[in-house]
Amino acid sequence: LVLSWSPTHCASQPNNPVDSQCNPRSGRAYSFIMHGLWPQHDVGWPESCPTRQRPFVPESTISRMMDVMPSRRLVRHEWEKHGVCTGMGAAEYYGKARTAFGNVRIPAGFQSPKNARTVAPAKIRDEFVAANPGLPREAVTVNCAGRFLSEVRVCVGKDLKGRACSAEVQRQACR
């Protein structure tokens, strides 16, 4: 489960009027959003898998995801790149993705940030583990864009319960 940090994303999209994550019509400022739920093997991962039909996400499914994935383009992209590789239909895939996202409590300090913070990646991981009792420390990685937080990855099994991330995912984390 990949959670993107909106302030870093939006800093890379200055004055982009069509990015609903950074310029929400609702006035809501986003913190973490669901980037996606990515199938992964212990080594490598499937992506952009061939299908018999053109990958398609019904508008009703897209609309249901907008509160946690505030970009229609992102919803479609994640389905085409990762969702089709699960063997599920779009509604089932996004149902599981929503459940996985709902199972993770965002630490209080990251819910509605008013000011920038300087925090070590290990502290961010510790805050996620503390906010989610039972989540193994090895199930959380923090990724950066340069010296800025870009995303938190929470590794889950098919049962959507936290499990240790693969060595490959752990190597991608920032220090």
Image: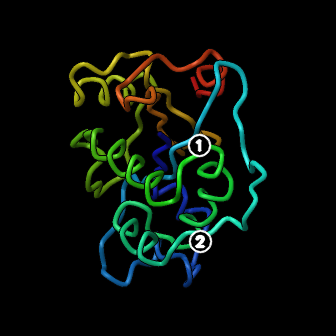
Considering only vertical position in the picture, is 70 above or below 51? below
Q: Earlier in the sequence, mark 1 or mark 2?
A: 2
User: Residue 140: x and y, percent?
Assistant: 44, 26
The numbered dot on residue 36 is none
Q: Give the quarter of the figure containing the C terminus.
A: top right
Question: Is label 2 in a helix, a strand or a loop?
Answer: helix
Pick the residue in front: 17 or 95. Answer: 95
Q: Which element type, helix, strand or loop, lies under badge 1?
A: helix
Q: Quadrant of residue 126?
A: top left
Q: Position of residue 96 (x, y in %)?
A: 40, 46
Residue at x 59%, y 79% (from the top left corner):
16
Tag shown at residue 73? 2
Q: Residues within 10 Å of mark 1 (few under 14, many from 20)?
A: some
- Say whether residue 48 is left or right of residue 116: right
The residue drawn where x is 24% and y is 19% is: 134
Type of residue at label 1?
Thr
- Residue type indicated by callout 2: Arg
Q: Residues within 10 Å of mark 2 (few under 14, many from 20)?
A: few
Instruction: Say left or right for 102 vs 3.
Output: left
Residue 175 visible in the picture: yes
